[in-house]
Image (cartoon, rainbow, N blue to C red):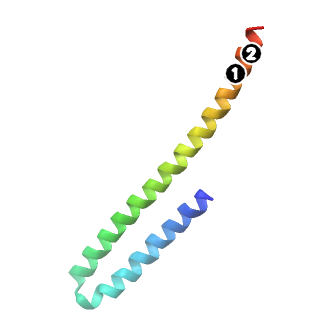
């Protein structure tokens, strides 16, 4: 589910930047470039946050697996 959201975020960032650039173009090329760059940085920040959440979720799952294995080893060697 998180990988789907990450892919959708990239699509929203790309098409959002394109639409934003075209919608601000009548106000001037400089303003449209500035607003588009600001939007791209904002979306990259959100994508980075989503990716960090995904990585932390994977780390937690891996830590749970390792804890289970260590508990099994400890129980086996303490008998």
Q: Position of residue 27 (x, y in %)?
A: 23, 89
Which element type, helix, strand or loop, lies under badge 1? Answer: helix
Residue contact at pointers 2 and 1, CB within 8 angstroms:
yes
**Residue appearing at x 70%, y 15% in the figure:** 74
Q: Position of residue 62 (x, y in %)?
A: 62, 36
**Residue appearing at x 23%, y 80% in the figure:** 31
Which element type, helix, strand or loop, lies under badge 2? Answer: helix
Q: Which residue is mark 1?
A: 71
Q: Which residue is mark 2?
A: 75
On screen, 27 above or below 17?
Answer: below
On screen, 2 above or below 76?
Answer: below
What crowding class fits label 2: few (fewer than 14 Cα within 10 Å), some (14-19), or many (20 or more)?
A: few
Instruction: Kindly report the distance in space between the C-alpha atoms of the residues bearing marks 2 and 1.
Output: 6 Å
**In the image shown, does 73 or 79 lie closer to the viewer?**
79
Q: Report which quarter residue 43 is drawn in.
A: bottom left
**Residue appearing at x 34%, y 70% in the figure:** 39
């Amino acid at each position: 589910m998180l990988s789907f959201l990450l892919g959708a975020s990239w699509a929203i960032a790309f098409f959002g930047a394109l639409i934003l650039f075209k919608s601000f173009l009548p106000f001037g090329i400089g303003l449209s470039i500035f607003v588009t760059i600001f939007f791209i940085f904002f979306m990259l920040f959100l994508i980075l946050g989503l990716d960090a959440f995904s990585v932390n979720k994977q780390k937690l799952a891996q830590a749970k697996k390792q804890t289970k294995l260590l508990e099994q080893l400890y129980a086996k060697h303490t008998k």
